[in-house]
Amino acid sequence: VIRVALFGAGRIGTIHAASVGAYPGTELSYVVDVNSEAAESLSAKFGARAVSVEEALGDPEIDLTMICSSTDTHADLIEKSARAGKAIFSEKPIDLSLERVRACLEVVKESGAKLMVGFNRRFDPNFLSLKEQLASGAIGTPELVTIASRDPGAPPPEYLKVSGGLFRDMTIHDFDMARWLLEEEPAYVYASGAALVDPRIEEFNDLDTAVVTLTCESGKMAVITNSRRATYGYDQRIEVHGSGGMLSAGNVLEHTVVRATEEGQVAGKPMHFFLKRYAAAYHNEFASLITALRAGGEITPSGDDGEKALRLAEAAFESLKSGSRITLS
Amino acid sequence: VIRVALFGAGRIGTIHAASVGAYPGTELSYVVDVNSEAAESLSAKFGARAVSVEEALGDPEIDLTMICSSTDTHADLIEKSARAGKAIFSEKPIDLSLERVRACLEVVKESGAKLMVGFNRRFDPNFLSLKEQLASGAIGTPELVTIASRDPGAPPPEYLKVSGGLFRDMTIHDFDMARWLLEEEPAYVYASGAALVDPRIEEFNDLDTAVVTLTCESGKMAVITNSRRATYGYDQRIEVHGSGGMLSAGNVLEHTVVRATEEGQVAGKPMHFFLKRYAAAYHNEFASLITALRAGGEITPSGDDGEKALRLAEAAFESLKSGSRITLS
Amino acid sequence: VIRVALFGAGRIGTIHAASVGAYPGTELSYVVDVNSEAAESLSAKFGARAVSVEEALGDPEIDLTMICSSTDTHADLIEKSARAGKAIFSEKPIDLSLERVRACLEVVKESGAKLMVGFNRRFDPNFLSLKEQLASGAIGTPELVTIASRDPGAPPPEYLKVSGGLFRDMTIHDFDMARWLLEEEPAYVYASGAALVDPRIEEFNDLDTAVVTLTCESGKMAVITNSRRATYGYDQRIEVHGSGGMLSAGNVLEHTVVRATEEGQVAGKPMHFFLKRYAAAYHNEFASLITALRAGGEITPSGDDGEKALRLAEAAFESLKSGSRITLS
Amino acid sequence: VIRVALFGAGRIGTIHAASVGAYPGTELSYVVDVNSEAAESLSAKFGARAVSVEEALGDPEIDLTMICSSTDTHADLIEKSARAGKAIFSEKPIDLSLERVRACLEVVKESGAKLMVGFNRRFDPNFLSLKEQLASGAIGTPELVTIASRDPGAPPPEYLKVSGGLFRDMTIHDFDMARWLLEEEPAYVYASGAALVDPRIEEFNDLDTAVVTLTCESGKMAVITNSRRATYGYDQRIEVHGSGGMLSAGNVLEHTVVRATEEGQVAGKPMHFFLKRYAAAYHNEFASLITALRAGGEITPSGDDGEKALRLAEAAFESLKSGSRITLS
């Protein structure tokens, strides 16, 4: 049995707790949250206990920590978990500062700890099917990856101010998907964008609408189009154009009904809420982690994947400011 | 060069005239219509002449007559053309009376004339692709044909009163498609239906909404669903379920645009007007006729196809009245 | 808290157990199964106990029994539960004999027990959306319901022999959907069909491919097309044609990926396994039951719904044998 | 009657000749081609005459010249037509040199001639529907235009060498579409790309795979993705993301049939041949030109549209070479 200590009893923590509960051979032992009521209530449902960070990490029976607390605590908890000899799952990002991420990963490396970073989209059944078909050679060599990634609505400016900015907060998922599908590191980053949804966020030098082009040395490219607002739902599509064809993963709709009337043929919208849209992905993600821990193999997405995606986000901001493409070393 | 005399300068005659004009090695020589203005004007466009039936049939240079006049003239013009030694294209139906059809086809047979009956849907690129895939064995043996065939709107009761009724006027196309796809003659016909669109047509024992089931001796079946009113456009879909899979031909839409907003995702409607929906079919139909005439082979859909479809229409009316299935000899 | 005793720890019982576990304010107290290992193991996962029928029904704390055991035990367990004063959920069918069903429902009625029959498809998010749009008047009055319902593959003849036959075992779901959507009882039933998938099942007077037409006094109709074999997956589609438009609920696909190559554009198949295809439906079904029990209102689908669907199945068999449509009283 | 002289009796000239023939109130009077056989044969079909440039332009009865000859003759023929007082339709591009284009347009301006440049895609029914919905405010303010434009297969390197390069030869259509949909002139151009389809074309400093980002002063953007090879057909899609929703125009498929088998659900491919894919567009283009000539209003796409698209193509090449975005004055 793999025993789990969960840090963070919020929305995403609750989802991971359910995955632990449902997955054979795993057990939720501890829940840690500053909100003790949330910790207690989540614990009760799965026969776990609400404890402190120290208690959870001090128990040698704990195999795995799952870090679902606020972003500014990730790096610390990763380091503490690593030093306590635990395997680690951390929600993305490790930290908003590339320097801090690097220091943290140094600690992970020294400790020899296993770390998965929660780029959940890699585990979405649709994107997974696209990746498998790509890997099987179904469309030859990939040449051009197109990612449309648009949120249903923007969080309030107050939240956005501390989010690290569009590229670190939202596009970072798309950078990870692009790297995963290109299977080659981008060499150049060019970003263009503006605050078209809400001009207030321009005040703190952020943007809400963007186009980012990644170019590899081989000539392969990826284009990401982002918006903080898609009135029709959570727009999440990926397309890979290759030497032998094209793969495209479309949106997941609320339902399959089409209503045909004089007004046209009206289909359902893309699912609106990211936790519902990616419900299967979270479940698959946990299954993949447990399978990898049991097999003793490598774990992906790794800390390195987290760092590289953040590096692309920084480069995108640099490009936006300079108006030039940024060359990655 | 194949020289054509056209009977009927109306809507459908104009379409066939254009096909003659566009097709290599064919020439429109005469147009015959009681409306002499229409005949003159159509002639002018293609360098033809407006003449009488007798003149047209009396010219030994004429190879082919195309009968696009009103339904009650079809059988007579087919017989006259056959006796004059012409190849014949006739719009469907040959006649509304099965007896008259049989007498007419007897004349055609005796004269040895070649006759194509205008079941244009066999030449629609979509249904043609379905048929070709079926014939290639792509889904094994067909078992169940489903035809949805619904007009955008009903003609006025006055027209319907002389139309021969739903099964002879509208379903007849679907009977032909069912026979074409089943490749086995139906042995049983069961029909159910009502006047749901316009109760007035019940007064002359007709209906506007129907379900017809055709069953073959082998157990293969076809189901046809009809309505005289589809608010969303001209609904023309065919599905064949076979031992190895399913083929479905969907509607042809006005355009490919999808509008995604808070209201849903709105696609275009099925094309509304049958002459536009089946524009390519009319063109292919003429090409097929000319090709067959040149090759000297058999011509389909034949007079026999016209008769058999009408026989099914009669059986459907019998079934509707008796509430029982009708056994075809 | 609503306390549940579960009869049957098999595939479908496990699914309902998980729904109880996940739903707020409900608790799984007992699991009953002749296979004591299965009962123990399922109990362990949810803190329940494996007991006998008598123990479970004898506990006054139990509010609800969920009957997921084999078909031949349903009627007995419903009657016992009713007499013990429990609310009852029973998987369909109540029994394969209409007489037995009626006797059982008499007991339920006398005891005043609440009973839901497990026609899970009414709770599928797609069909539910179709029903809601229909109820909202989005397409006016329904006129023609078309149901395509085809299993990926047939069970072995041995199973089919005791299944009650196609109409009682498989079409019964479609009869329920048709009644639910027509909102008027069918007055006439006509069935046609054959053993096209596996001729062996003809030996025990069953069939595997069918078309059933239901006609109401008002003229509204429903057509059901069934096959025991759909090579492309579990084919479950519903279409309602109304005076103001059409609603169609398409299949749920394995994934949203389309692969475009020289061979064509290849999309995913309909989900193959019914428990996965209808996973959300089972969950919604339980939620609807609990909501209704708490609100004290009527429960649907009711025992009466179970009886009426079975009555249609019997009529379909009668029609098949006689070749005539059957008039329902 | 509007009388037309046609320059060029090749593939595209033949299509325009047919449009003249079919359109009421227009007449094809002359065909000019160095290949006199082609000129004669095309003339014969429409009752025109094969003559020299001088004869055609010297006839005061000619209202309109249609220039469908090779690219290097366009500017000369436009100038000659303008000086002869004719209205002019010219296939794109006016010339491959921006300087030559400007000189030519100067002549047109001085002469007061009306000129339409053949950006046929503006007249495609699908893109037209998208544009109309956009103009009606259906999705609010456009923010992000995405154009996928990929040819089925690359011409031989010999052709490409004299084509002016990818951006002038192929992307120029997309530049025009972007300008048309953004309704604001791009201020910055950034291009990235490579020779991934055929490395030989790198030898003459061209590319076959590209991503171009256009950014307006307001922050609106357009992204174009190009490839000279799409194994699945002619890929022509446009998407506009706006403040109130999204419009997307999908590909036009060969047929509407879907084949569902164990292998998946296989739909038709995008139409392969550009003349067939855009057949309706060519027809609408001519209708629009005649309507505008009759109404005496402005003609679009204008010479200015031709020049501006070419300017974007040049900027894209500059950006590709420098690796920086180019600021347009």
Image (cartoon, coloured by chain):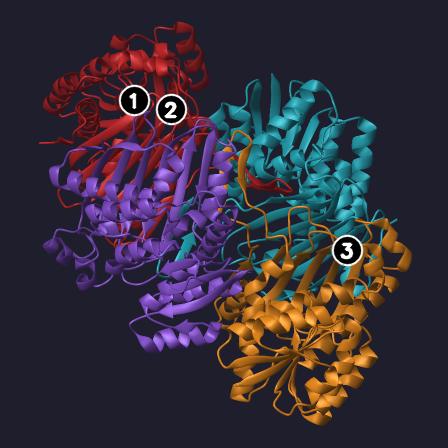
Chain colours: A purple, B cyan, C orange, D red
Q: Give residue C92's quadrant in the image.
A: bottom right
Is B259 in front, or is A45?
A45
Q: Mark 2 belongs to which subunit?
A: D
Amino acid type at image mark 1: Leu
Q: Provide the residue designation for mark 1.
A: D166
A221 to the left or right of B41: left
As helix, strand or loop, the secondary structure at mark 1 comes to helix
Q: Residues within 10 Å of mark 2 (few under 14, many from 20)?
A: many
Q: Are marks 2 and 1 in contact (CB under 8 Å)?
A: yes
Identified at 50% across, 44% down, the residue is A129
Name the disc covering residue D228, or none. Answer: 2
Is A118 in front, or is A62?
A62
As helix, strand or loop, the secondary structure at mark 3 comes to loop
Quadrant (top left, top right, bottom left, bottom right) of the C terminus of chain A: top left
Alpha carbons under labels 2 and 3: distance apart: 50 Å
Q: Provide the residue designation for mark 3.
A: C155
Q: Are marks 2 and 3 on the same chain?
A: no
D266 to the left or right of D52: right
Name the disc covering residue B38, or none. Answer: none
Q: Mark 3 belongs to which subunit?
A: C
Any part of residue B253 in sight: no
Amino acid type at image mark 3: Pro
Identified at 65% across, 18% down, the residue is B61
Q: How far across and down, in percent of the image, does residue A187 sit?
A: 26, 31
Q: How far across and down, in percent of the image, does residue A70 sit?
A: 27, 62
Q: How far across and down, in percent of the image, does residue C215 sit?
A: 70, 68
C48 to the left or right of A318: right
